[in-house]
């Protein structure tokens, strides 16, 4: 597996935001979101540490931190990701989240005994990657998962609402709206949620970008 960074930090996003987590960031992505804050990991020439799934698991256990976030780049494109998920799913002490970009079919992982929590982005218009979304994924998501709408404009928010309504997302999974950092006034999101009575939707701000420099790596 192509690991570009591994570290322990405070999870800055999602269901366990504010809790310690061990991060494994993999190299490479099939998308090219205009706002990507980790584009460096997707450079074809990026340096990485070749690790086996067993070595990744050993590192995770060594940290003694029970939350794990697999991310990237696009983690589900790693050749041995299935093997790693099998390994992690057998450890009852671990809570595993995967940050995935919405273009990889989640049905590929539906036969896992104890599946991870998928945090699936739906790429909105601002990303330039909306056409790559695998809409079937909305049928795969369950109450343990999350859909994340990373939003940079009112048009993005309108589209997010459209998808939330069309797929009744708040009835089946956790729904998060996250600002493209520095691109949209936070109040714009709050006002949109109030004006549209977006009940059951969580607004988040990437906590790690409040604690550290937004471009800092390894946090
Ligand atoms: C770097 S991506 C890696 C995982 C996967 N490729 C994906 O896009 O979900 C991790 C998360 O950071 C979000 N993200 C990337 N750049 C961002 C930015 N500039 N502002 C806010 N969130 C951002 C992504 O949308 C995704 O939810
Ligand atoms: N602290 C911290 N929390 C995170 N949660 C999800 C992240 C990601 O890049 O997927 C991330 C990240 O990059 N840093
Ligand atoms: S899918 Fe994720 S890693 Fe890939 S470009 Fe978009 S935000 Fe970056
Ligand atoms: Mg990040």
Image (tube, helix red, strand yellow):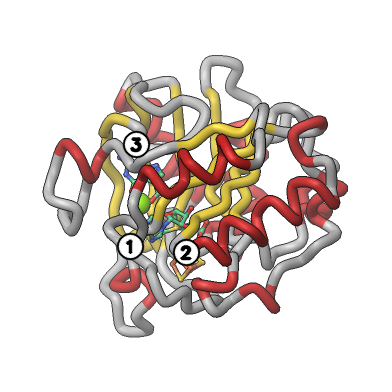
Q: How many marks?
A: 3
Q: Is residue 85 visible?
A: no
Residue 163: where, in percent of width, then height? Answer: 75, 54
Residue at left offset 54%, top offset 32%: 202
Q: Which residue is mark 3?
A: 12
Q: Is mark 1 within 8 Å of ligand 1?
A: yes
* In this view, the mark in front (3 or 2): 2
Q: Are marks 2 and 1 in contact (CB under 8 Å)?
A: yes
Q: Quadrant of residue 206?
A: top left
Q: Which residue is mark 2?
A: 153
The alpha-carbon separation of the residues under discs 3 and 2 comes to 22 Å
Q: Quadrant of the C terminus?
A: top left
Relative to 33, residue 14 above or below: above
Residue 152: where, in percent of width, then height? Answer: 44, 63
Of the four image quadrants, the one with ligand 1 is bottom left
The alpha-carbon separation of the residues under discs 2 and 1 comes to 8 Å
Q: Which residue is mark 1?
A: 183
* In this view, the mark in front (1 or 3): 1
């Amino acid at each position: 597996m192509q690991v570009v960074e591994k570290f322990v930090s405070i999870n800055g996003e999602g269901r366990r935001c504010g809790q310690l987590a061990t991060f494994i960031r993999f190299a490479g992505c099939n998308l090219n979101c205009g706002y990507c804050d980790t584009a460096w990991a997707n450079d074809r020439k990026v340096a990485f540490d070749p690790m086996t799934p067993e070595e990744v698991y050993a590192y995770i256990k060594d940290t003694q931190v029970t939350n794990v976030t697999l991310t990237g780049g696009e983690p589900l494109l790693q050749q041995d990701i299935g093997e790693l998920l099998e390994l992690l799913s057998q450890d009852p002490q671990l809570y595993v989240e995967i940050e995935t970009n919405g273009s990889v079919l989640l049905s590929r992982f539906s036969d896992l005994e104890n599946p991870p929590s998928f945090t699936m982005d739906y790429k909105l218009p601002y990303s330039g990657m909306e056409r790559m979304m695998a809409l079937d994924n909305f049928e795969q998501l369950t109450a343990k998962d999350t859909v994340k709408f990373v939003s940079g404009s009112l048009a993005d928010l309108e589209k997010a609402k459209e998808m939330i309504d069309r797929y009744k997302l708040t009835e089946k999974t956790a729904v998060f709206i996250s600002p493209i950092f520095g691109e949209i006034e936070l109040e714009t999101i709050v006002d949109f949620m109030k004006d549209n009575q977006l009940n059951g939707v969580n607004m988040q701000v990437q906590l790690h970008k409040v604690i550290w420099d937004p471009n800092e790596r390894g946090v």
